[in-house]
Image (spheres, rainbow, N blue to C red):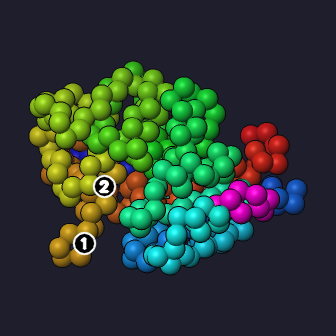
Amino acid sequence: MCAQRIEGKAISDAIRVEIGEEAAKLAARGIVPGLAVVLVGDDPASKVYVGSKAKACEQLGYYSEVHRLEAAASQDELLQLIDKLNNQSNIHGILVQLPLPKHIDEKSVIDAISVAKDVDGFHPVSVGNLVIGDDSLLPCTPAGVIELIKRSGIEIAGKHAVVIGRSNIVGKPVAMLLLREHATVTICHSRTADMEAIAKTADILVVAIGKAKAIGRSFVKPGAIVIDVGINRLSDGKLAGDVDYDDVLDTAGYVTPVPGGVGPMTITMLMLNTLKAAKQQNQIEE
Ligand code: GUN
């Protein structure tokens, strides 16, 4: 058996077409979704991500602002900028690119973003709403994982989903979203005893640990859906996921490639959140 490859790029492109149609409807009512992206310092990977976000906005006809602060910028300076953006009516979404320089407290910054404009879904109120099942802006990568599974025609309800990794950005929220979709969810992490045996019982295996090719076929139940959230740079410059793609190919039923799997979905979900935020801030029903 050879696993079916889940084409994240194609699924992401299809969703962007849908978003473009919705954005055009809003434009006809005089509303242009606006996103502000804030970058502090000059981390090369962050610069690339910020550039891609601005480009996605341009392609969809959104308004966007990119604010670049020096690495030495103070926390106060950043908080003042967030305050200004919170009060700016042409900005519906605010994203502060992480990680921040060490002298800035990430939590204070995330807490300062208006919940209505929290398109990253990182604010404690957004996280709380996600956990209790209230409407909120969903964190982009976890929401992208759910969309990939659903749009591949896979039913989530009743399945055993195992999430490897417990970060606030991916592991925990993706587990909550799978639960909301009625999966039975197990979260594994660095202290889990016999992770391999647990992973092998998964119908859906989501891996987000940040270690190149750490998960091979011995972790995969035959026919399982394997979603690889990792993006790791190898010493030869190539990208690899947390899953050893070639190794699991004959065992898994479905698998996402890296690149071209979960990655393209993240910015697409950010665009969807910005659209949703623009609608909500203009009292437009979904
Ligand atoms: N850095 C890496 N991933 C993300 C993300 O999803 N949002 C933000 N703000 N920063 C990131």
Relative image position of residue 15 (x, y in whole percent): 58, 53
Callout 1 amino acid? Lys
Q: Looking at the image, can residue 47 be seen?
A: no
The percent coordinates of residue 179 (x first, y second) are: 43, 27
Q: Which residue is mark 2?
A: 230
* Residue at (54, 55) in percent of width and height: 109
Reply above or below: 170 against 261. above
Residue 148: percent from left, percent from top: 45, 46
Q: Nearer the viewer, residue 206 or 98?
A: 98
Name above or below for residue 232 compared with residue 189: below
In magenta segment, residue 143? no
Left or right: where does residue 67 sit relative to residue 74? right
Q: Residue 258 appears at what percent x and percent y?
A: 32, 60
Q: Which mark is residue 251?
A: none
Q: Magenta stretch: residue 87 in it? A: yes
In the image, which is nearer the foreground, mark 2 or mark 1? 2
| Left or right placement of residue 184 versus residue 54 in this view | left
**Amino acid, disc 2:** Gly
SS type, badge 1: loop
Label 2 vs 1, first from the N-terminus: 2
Indicate the quadrant where residue 201 lies. Answer: top left
Q: Quadrant of the N terminus?
A: top left
Give the magenta range: 82-90
Image height check: is 218 above or below 76?
A: above
Mark 1 lies on residue: 238
